[in-house]
Amino acid sequence: MLSLLDVAQIIGAMLAVLHVAFGVSPNAVSGYSRTTAADATSRVPVLTIDGASIDALAAPSGTKAIVFVFTSTDCPISNRYAPEIRRIVEGFARQGVMFRLVYPSPSEEASAIRAHMAAFGYEGAIDALRDPKLALVKHVKATVTPEAAVVVNGRAVYVGRIDDRYVDLGLERPAPTTHDLADALTAVLAGKPIARATTQAVGCFIADFAR
């Protein structure tokens, strides 16, 4: 019978062979892979503002993570988060993180989305997607706007609030005490585990948009 040491040595040898033969890093087994290209089985169809169908999980080579921020044109809490969302985009976009605003309400038309992006300073800073069939919502299990999902290799590694500024509807802290989205991105870029993979976001329920 093989000892634990023998098993460990065999696994190490197998990883080394994979690294030489296929370029698979041994560290990729326990850490985050540095590509977010989705395979054919995990395609998540969404729409551009102009109505073209695209895969939400597709990303340029070298993208380390995709951040989807679910929002809506008339959700007050979503709109109040615009400055913080822009700040996070500015801080992480140059580090290989791709950001996408996602409008899940089927009733929000292209003209309203463009006006909303212009009014809240998103235009030119972050691209937008429409998710009227809630394909992306279901893929990452988002429930409210605003809510963020960090996706690596097609899998959501963080889903939840941007920070803890809002305790509940109508109950707001003077300033946040945790910056959950920024902390999650910092962990991903460092190849470290995210301390809290899910948090409870406060805002407008996405399920209400589909009624």
Image (tube, rainbow, N blue to C red):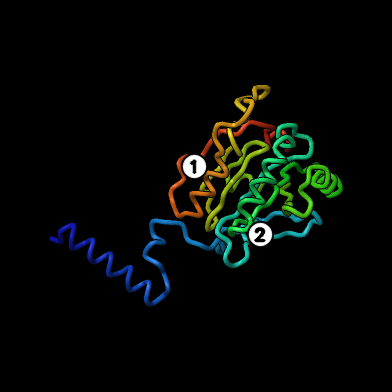
Q: Earlier in the sequence, mark 2 or mark 1?
A: 2
The residue carrying mark 1 is: 197
Task: Judge whether residue 84 can be spotted in this image.
Answer: yes
Secondary structure under the numbered disc 2 in the rendered image: strand
Judged from this view, the residue extending furthest toward the left is 1
Above or below 125: residue 196: above
Please state the horizontal and vertical placement of residue 27, each as a whole percent of the image.
38, 62
Secondary structure under the numbered disc 1 in the rendered image: loop
Closest to the observer, 142 or 106: 142
Is residue 66 toward the left or the right of residue 112 in the image?
left
Quarter assignment of residue 205:
top right
Residue at 64% of width from left, 26% of height from top? 174
The residue carrying mark 2 is: 55
Above or below 109: residue 204: above
Q: What distance separates the C-alpha of mark 2 from that of mark 1?
A: 24 Å
Query: What amino acid is labelled 2 in the image?
Result: Asp
